[in-house]
Amino acid sequence: MTDGATDRPGEPAVGGTTGLGTRGVRAAVIGTGLIGGSVLLRLRDAGLDVAGWDPDPATRQQARAAGISSPESLDEAVADRDVVFLCGPLPTLPETLLRVAGVTGDRCVLTDVGSTKAELAAFAVAHGLGGRFVPGHPMAGGDQAGLTAADPGLFDEAAWVLCPAGGTGLAAFRWLTELVIAVFRARVVPMSPVEHDTVAALSSHVPHLLARALAGAVQRAELRDAVLGLAAGSFRDGTRVAATPSDRTANMLLGNRERVLAELGRVTGFLDELAGALRAGDAAALVAAHEEARAARRALLGRPFHAHRREFPVGGDHGEELAYLLELGAAGGHLTDCRVEGGRVSYAGRRPA
């Protein structure tokens, strides 16, 4: 889509794309809490025609006070939109997806921001929406909730998972990838829904359990106030997500229950090793375990990346393109550009050295 073009995302013009221009793109955001509100504000700041809708009348009024269109009905908010972001609570997403799909055109791209992907992705395919629904998950957040806590810069340089599918779904993925990179300045990580849920269990969901376990143990301690009086950065950093809304966290954990339990077992196994070494007074074992953990922390903070480019035909069976995308995400890489031009789709990306 060129700047000011009118091509719809579900049917991108073959050979006409020289980079995404946001003029003419009409967006809607359903559910305007912390994440949805941040999406809404960023779309507005980027100059898009955007409408927001939330089931809470007070939240809709807050959006209007910020100068953003917020119709009274969901149907009015999504009417004649090119892309709709579904940002409500996880349990509501299947019903919302069907409702939005029923009142938008076939060329409207649908995506979500939920923290689990496999169940909703399968639901979309089962209801014939795999061609225009792109499961998504921006890996960003905060310990506050609501539109008043929203931040249009929340997604800068954040990883934003998008799940590509074969067939017509790949066209929607390409278009949305370009939009997310251009508007949100995020790092798009292509992953399968199942791989996302497996990875997110250890990178995001289990840390919520550990933070609550540590904070909960302090809350029950006899010397609670003294502990809090001495709490330093390690305690504050380790328990930050314990302040997030409890119902939101419970929905996330239950939505990925089996994978979370499996990865929690991996963590408790490591804890058992540490406890065993401590009981035995085995300093060498404690140091070795510490160095193993330190390697992951150091890699998180300073991994070198190699830039690369890949190109594929827009037509065909897309098998090679899809394989490339899924392998890149599984390898810890991400996309920095995506554009369609001259019957070819080109990707720029980075992968760990």
Image (tube, rainbow, N blue to C red):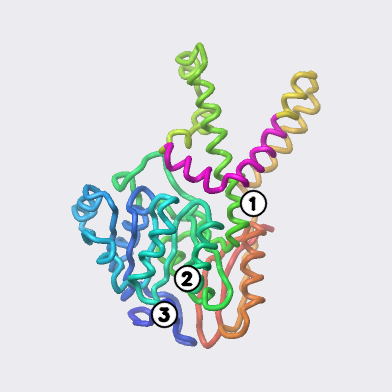
Which image quarter is the N terminus in? bottom left
Q: How many marks?
A: 3
Q: Between residues 2 and 200, which one lies in front from this camera angle?
A: 200
Can you identify the residue that label 3 sits on?
A: 1
**Mark positioned earlier in the residue sequence (3 or 1):** 3
Please report the residue visible at 51 percent of the width from the left and 25 percent of the height from the top: 216
Can you identify the residue that label 2 sits on?
A: 129
Q: Which residues are magenta?
A: 246-271
Residue 300 among magenta residues: no
Foreground label between 3 and 1: 3
Residue 8 at x, y percent in the picture: 38, 79
Q: Secondary structure at mark 2?
A: loop
Q: Between residues 40 and 197, which one lies in front from this camera angle?
A: 197
User: Few, some or many C-alpha atoms within 10 Å of disc 1 (few <14, some 14-19, many ≥20)?
Assistant: few
Residue 84 at x, y percent in the picture: 37, 65
Q: Is residue 312 left or right of residue 108?
A: right
Can you identify the residue that label 1 sits on?
A: 303
**How far, Cα to Cα, is label 3 from label 1?**
34 Å
**Mark positioned earlier in the residue sequence (2 or 1):** 2
The quarter holding residue 80 reads bottom left
Which image quarter is the C terminus in? bottom right
User: Few, some or many C-alpha atoms within 10 Å of disc 3 (few <14, some 14-19, many ≥20)?
Assistant: many
In the depicted structure, whether residue 3 falls above or below residue 36: below
Q: Secondary structure at mark 1?
A: loop
Three-letter amino acid code at disc 2? Leu
Please report the residue visible at 78 percent of the width from the left and 23 percent of the height from the top: 283
**How far, Cα to Cα, is label 2 from label 1?**
37 Å
Name the outermost residue toward the top. 222
Q: Secondary structure at mark 3?
A: loop
Q: Between residues 310 and 58, which one lies in front from this camera angle?
A: 58
Three-letter amino acid code at disc 1? Arg
In the depicted structure, whether residue 265 falls above or below residue 107: above
